[in-house]
Image: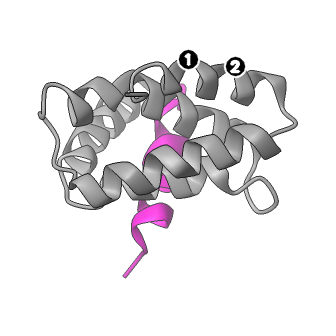
Amino acid sequence: MATPVAHLENILQHTWNADKGIRTQAEAALTTFMGQAGSLSAIMTLVADAAGKDRNMRQAATIVLKNNLRNYWIEKIYVSSDAEQAAVRQGMLDTLIAETDTSIRSLLSDALKHVVD
């Protein structure tokens, strides 16, 4: 069985498929994935893995993170514990400090605006 991060990578790869049907299925799978406990941590793990993951994959994960933080933090549409949110917030800061890719840095910077108290 695939890890949550591997499952997320598989979903994200299909979101940019040329076939509209595959993209639509991937987007539905992403929505389902985000509704699962631990999904926020899995997204952050993929974002932070600069050495092991393709830039496009990390950028896609960062966009998903940025676009959905409100659903985790404020609107509580998706499940995330206070501990998971604290870990992700710290992970975002740590990744932002270490990140050399300007696109990912910019996306993370925008995302942090949603979670800073």
Q: Which residue is labeled 2 in the image? A: 106
The mark tally for this picture is 2
Residue 16, above or below 84: above
Q: Which residue is labeled 1 in the image? A: 110
Q: How would you rate the neighbour count of disc 2 (Cα within 10 Å): few for under 14, some for 14-19, many for 20 or more?
A: few
Left or right for 3, reference 38: right
Q: Position of residue 95 (x, y in %)?
A: 69, 46
Region in magenta: 1-18
Q: Nearer the viewer, residue 92 or 63?
A: 92
**Residue 57 visible in the displayed image:** no
Q: Secondary structure at mark 1?
A: helix
Q: Position of residue 41 (x, y in %)?
A: 41, 57
| Marker disc for residue 61 | none
Q: Identify the residue at horizontal 57%, vertical 42% (top origin).
A: 92
Q: How would you rate the neighbour count of disc 1 (Cα within 10 Å): few for under 14, some for 14-19, many for 20 or more?
A: some
Magenta region, mostly helix, strand or loop?
A: helix
Q: Nearer the viewer, residue 66 or 61?
A: 66
Amino acid type, mark 1: Asp
Spatial separation of the CA atoms under disc 1 and disc 2: 6 Å
**For the residues bearing labels 1 and 2, Cβ distance under 8 angstroms:** yes
Q: Identify the residue at horizontal 35%, vertical 39% (top origin).
A: 26
Q: How is the image coloured?
A: one colour
Image quadrant holding the N terminus, namely: bottom left
Amino acid type, mark 2: Ser
Residue at the farthest bottom position: 1
Q: Position of residue 117 (x, y in %)?
A: 37, 28
Q: Identify the residue at horizontal 33%, vertical 57% (top origin).
A: 84
Q: Nearer the viewer, residue 104 or 58?
A: 104
Residue 115, above or below 3: above
User: Residue 73 in magenta?
Assistant: no
Left or right for 81, reference 1: left
Left or right for 26, reference 90: left
